[in-house]
Amino acid sequence: MRVKVLGSAAGGGFPQWNCACSQCRRLREGSFSGLPRTQTQLAWNGAPGKWTLLNASPDLRAQIEATPELWPRGGERHSPIRDVILTGAEVDQTLGLLLLREFHAFCVHATASVRRLLTEDNSLFGVLARFAGQVCWNDIPLEGSFSTAGARLEALSLAGSFPGFVRSERLAESNPAEAVIGLVVSPETGSGSLAFLPGTAYASDFLLERLEASDTVLFDGTFWSDDEPLHIPGVTRTARQMGHLPVSGPGGTLERLAALRRPRKIFIHINNTNPMLDQESAAHRMVRESGWEVAWDGMEITL
Ligand SMILES: [Zn+2]
């Protein structure tokens, strides 16, 4: 099974359209030692000609065009995209669904709470119900496994919260355990597994056990330090308060996941302010020397 990283940045991408931080500025000016990145997006082919998208980023159209495997074939309307799995309801994870509205039938897999708030509270998602059978919605169970073409998946409930745009009445009737999930993906036949956790504020002992049993871990690389977002104009919460375990510092990811021996460890969902994006930085060096990789757009992982 081939897993492609179509996008590796946090929300906003790198550079972010309205950000003039030192990193975004240097990247635009051509003096930055590192790559531009689109917003986090994964895709895999579980079966010949059948691709599954993991989340639907706001950059999805450009990411599909940058990936020949996802292009339509034959002389008519076609797409190898069969399934889209959502790990939450944030704009970064769902906006791309609206870009798939051109009369292509596919299935969306989301927790029941995420499905309800997208399909019942937001009329914009009606563009995915223009004809019978356009989009089928499947509820992701928090216990046990589910499958898409050629892949077996298991949800890991993470201690996240629903997006700020969700109405209070909807919040009251939604299951907090269904707000943000991570996923463990394995090919239906054969071995190998990949854990995807782009947003988690906490790494429990249970979670560490699950990660140690995986072959590859794609983990939250949003912020380098807990106070990093406080330097972003308008942001008043720390990394942890925003649902992201910082990479460095006491109890941070490098320390907390240092004991993992089995999996290949890769940071994904990297914010434009994170110094590890700069390949000449001490942060980047520390990450590499700790045995971690930093995901990039176009990276491919074989399971
Ligand atoms: Zn920036």
Image: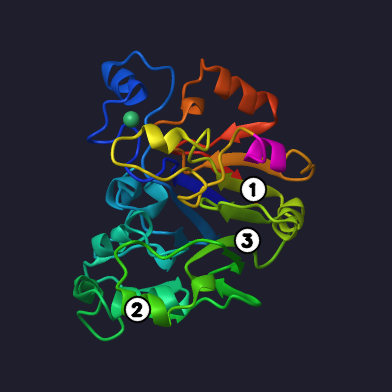
Q: Residue at x 72, y 45 (%)?
A: 263
Three-letter amino acid code at the position of disc 1: Val
Q: Cβ of disc 3 within 8 Å of ligand 1?
A: no
Dot 1: within a 10 Å radius of its alpha carbon, few (fewer than 14), some, or many (20 or more) residues?
A: many
> Which residue: 42% across, 40% down?
9
The span picked out in magenta is 250-257
Q: Position of residue 135 (x, y in %)?
A: 33, 77
Residue 255 belongs to magenta span = yes
Q: Which mark is residue 170?
A: 2
State the image quarter where residue 255 is shown: top right
- Residue 168 falls in image quadrant: bottom left
Q: Secondary structure under badge 2?
A: helix
Left of 299 or right of it: where is 7?
A: left
* Residue at x 66%, y 47% (from the top left corner): 216
Q: Which mark is residue 184?
A: 3
User: Which residue carries the number 1 mark?
Assistant: 217
> Residue 75, can we see it?
no
- Left or right: 242 in relation to 26: right
On the image, the x and y values in percent for residue 169 come to: 32, 80
Q: What's the mark number on residue 27? A: none
